[in-house]
Amino acid sequence: MTQSVEIICVGTELLLGDILNSNAQFLARELAQLGMAHYYQTVVGDNPERIKGVVKVASDRAQLLIFTGGLGPTPDDLTHETLAACFGVPMVEHPEILEDITRKFAQRGRTMTANNRKQALLPQGATVLTNDSGSAPGIIWQPHPDLTILTFPGVPAEMQRMWRDVAVPYLHSQGWGQTIIYSRTLKFWGISESALAEKVNAFFDLQNPTVAPYANHGEVKLRISARAASEAGALQLISPVEEQLRQIGGLDCYGADSDSLASVVGTLLKTTRSTLAVAESCTGGGLGEAITSVPGSSSYFWGGIISYDNAIKVRMLDVDEQDLEAHGAVSHTVAKQMAAGVRSRLGTTWGLSITGIAGPDGGTTEKPVGLVYIGLAEPDGVQSFEHQFGTSRGRDWIRRLSAATALDYLRRSIINKLLIK
Amino acid sequence: MTQSVEIICVGTELLLGDILNSNAQFLARELAQLGMAHYYQTVVGDNPERIKGVVKVASDRAQLLIFTGGLGPTPDDLTHETLAACFGVPMVEHPEILEDITRKFAQRGRTMTANNRKQALLPQGATVLTNDSGSAPGIIWQPHPDLTILTFPGVPAEMQRMWRDVAVPYLHSQGWGQTIIYSRTLKFWGISESALAEKVNAFFDLQNPTVAPYANHGEVKLRISARAASEAGALQLISPVEEQLRQIGGLDCYGADSDSLASVVGTLLKTTRSTLAVAESCTGGGLGEAITSVPGSSSYFWGGIISYDNAIKVRMLDVDEQDLEAHGAVSHTVAKQMAAGVRSRLGTTWGLSITGIAGPDGGTTEKPVGLVYIGLAEPDGVQSFEHQFGTSRGRDWIRRLSAATALDYLRRSIINKLLIK
């Protein structure tokens, strides 16, 4: 059986939900990059009996246990003494730790308390995992030949530094993490997770690289993960699979890794030397906000009109009052006029508009909450698109989906123009 | 022994560190508020054998197991079938789920795939925990009298809604969570956590209710938590403390619980029967987005101009070209002219503007990244405010702080006007 690692986070504050368990995520990502198999994470409170139970279960499943939390000076910090009890060894005071703590307190002009002496006590046989940024040291300990234990304080900054400076070099020296796992994530818009899964089903059986789907707020992702000796080796395994998946995904695949719809649209606008303006109703600025979240967006995004009130649609976007009357603000006609209006008012290549019913109120049977029209104006004319995001999704989600979908229409339109040429 | 709960999050993406386990934090906080004892959280991958092992361990320790994740339509979503296998029952298809999924796909104009049929299969004896916002339902299941199992999808928005709408009422009906922990959170803007902590230090020693400070992204919160038999009983303990804390906080305390700066400003605009328009440069729409995140904001928010490009500031906001030259776009002068311009162009009571350097580029020694000017126009005149949010905070954070700070200036101005009257 392959050696495996287990992460155990100790802290009642985690059980109370006072803090997010960012330490588990950090360590998980590090282990993945080191190619160290890691199958379980456990959170347990500052309680000796329960910690003992967790150590029992984990040490039967894994060869390396990584603890965070419970190393502080207060009486409820029990990780080290509980570990000593688990393996029936006494706690031993380390004078060098005591010195170190005393020195650090002096440096910060604080006086050391009796509590802090406690932090100099470690299980017999454990070596110190030094903590340069805080007072609580961790341990590197092999209570028996088949089990290694590393402990870190719960403070993320201290834990991360100790991990990188001390723990990783130690693990390499012990033969851990000789292979790495490198991942590439393809991102899709405009296709459901299940529909995409059907198209790429065969890839889910691959062993190296593996392919796994994720979905979140309308976006679907495929993660391609390869295990290899180096990043270059992993990329060699990933590239052919990525190429096939991009082929299958077609236009629905908008990018990879850190790409966002806004960043991809930005790149397309730059390469086509074109500019963009937006007219927003139900998103109230969310589309512009998304576009300008990309550094350097000022080179292609000129601005926009937030026409939340109908009077503003008429006054600032030249939407026809009769059409507003006849078709309502949430309609193909008004979406088109908003897009054309902002394009001519601001003088850009593209005009992109959104008008819809984000709810919770304002829906009718013909025009329910979640109904959104997107308008897209360009030199060759104006189009509009109708979308029904569903009445059940809630205001924030409908607004986010509307902005992303508008960007996706622009993305597809620019690409199609490029393909025609 | 008291009944206890265990949270089990299923998902290889958690083991790879791709996502933060926010579901565990949400559920942990909810359980704490319900006064339900909760001693362990476990994360395990989408692997039947390992999930079985975790269920075995957890069902020996707890009487209620809460699962998140692994309910999706793809082949690696295995939670329900693995649970069925754990307790030796078959999977049974639920036509009503199939109908529901089909309806949702139709509503969203998408066609259902064979994969989605899988989501209609539940362990025999389990009842459906309905999911109104997504396709994957959860279950409420008592595989034997001493064990209850709840499952939720991994998508936080869906899970949270199902928890509040269905699971909590069910748990109450089963006698869970009889003594409750009820909390009230006071929210502050414009004061640092340490400065506020100094003012309210004495309150941190209280036992029931307890008072604890939190801070994130410029907002400071004080949570007042009381343990009692009922919400009414808890409120009786909380109210006097809340009153004193509000006294001490003064204008820095902008609201409580679900209040946001945008919702508070909205209420103030409604009560003063005044209207608002915005002019945004570096926030690119984020201010309007925040204002319109409040349902019903159309009654006081008319719209705005996103003047990302300087030409738009001149053409759409009547900013003086010479002043733009002389003072630069990021200046008191231009902030004032943007606010006045959008107010007169849109014809609202208030005009609120933001112009600044969000970075990462565009900073100079005189005008570093993080420098932001906020303009506020009203019938009595125009003011502007300078802010330095620091070069280190990053583009997103600077933009969010700018929008929130602008709303806070408007909030304080409206309140001061009310106080003068």
Image (spheres, coloured by chain):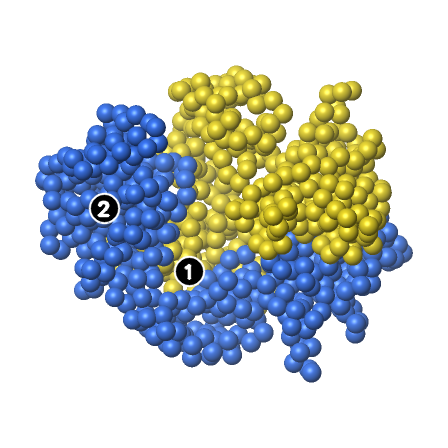
Chain colours: A blue, B yellow
In the rendered image, the vertical position of residue A341 relative to residue B4, given as above or below: below
In the rendered image, the vertical position of residue A272 relative to residue A365, given as above or below: below
The percent position of residue B392, horizontal first and vertical second, equals 52, 46
For label 2, the SS is strand
Disc 1 versus disc 2: distance between alpha carbons?
Answer: 50 Å
Camera sees residue A228: yes
The quadrant of the image that shows the N terminus of chain A is: bottom left
The percent position of residue A151, horizontal first and vertical second, equals 24, 45
Which residue occupies the foreground of this view, B374 or B295?
B374
**Subunit ID for the residue under disc 1:** B
Q: In the image, what residue occupies the spot 58% across and 74% down?
A: A251
The percent position of residue A397, horizontal first and vertical second, equals 59, 52
Asked if both marks, 1 and 2, belong to the same chain, the answer given is: no
Q: In the image, what residue occupies the spot 68% across and 29% down?
A: B412
List the single residue furthest toward the bottom.
A421
Camera sees residue B296: no
Q: Which amino acid lies under the numbered mark 1 shown in the image of this protein?
A: Leu
| Foreground tag (1 vs 2) | 2
Q: In the image, what residue occupies the spot 14% across and 50% down?
A: A142
Residue A381 in which image quadrant: bottom right
Which residue occupies the foreground of this view, B182 or B420?
B420
Which residue occupies the foreground of this view, A134 or A75?
A134
Estimate how packed mark 2 is, as few (under 14), some (14 to 19) or many (20 or more) residues with alpha carbons within 10 Å.
many
In the rendered image, the vertical position of residue B132 relative to residue B46, given as above or below: above
Q: Which amino acid lies under the numbered mark 2 shown in the image of this protein?
A: Leu
Which numbered tag is attached to residue A129?
2
**Subunit ID for the residue under disc 2:** A
Q: Which residue is mark 1?
A: B121
A305 sits to left or right of B253: right
Which numbered tag is attached to residue B265?
none
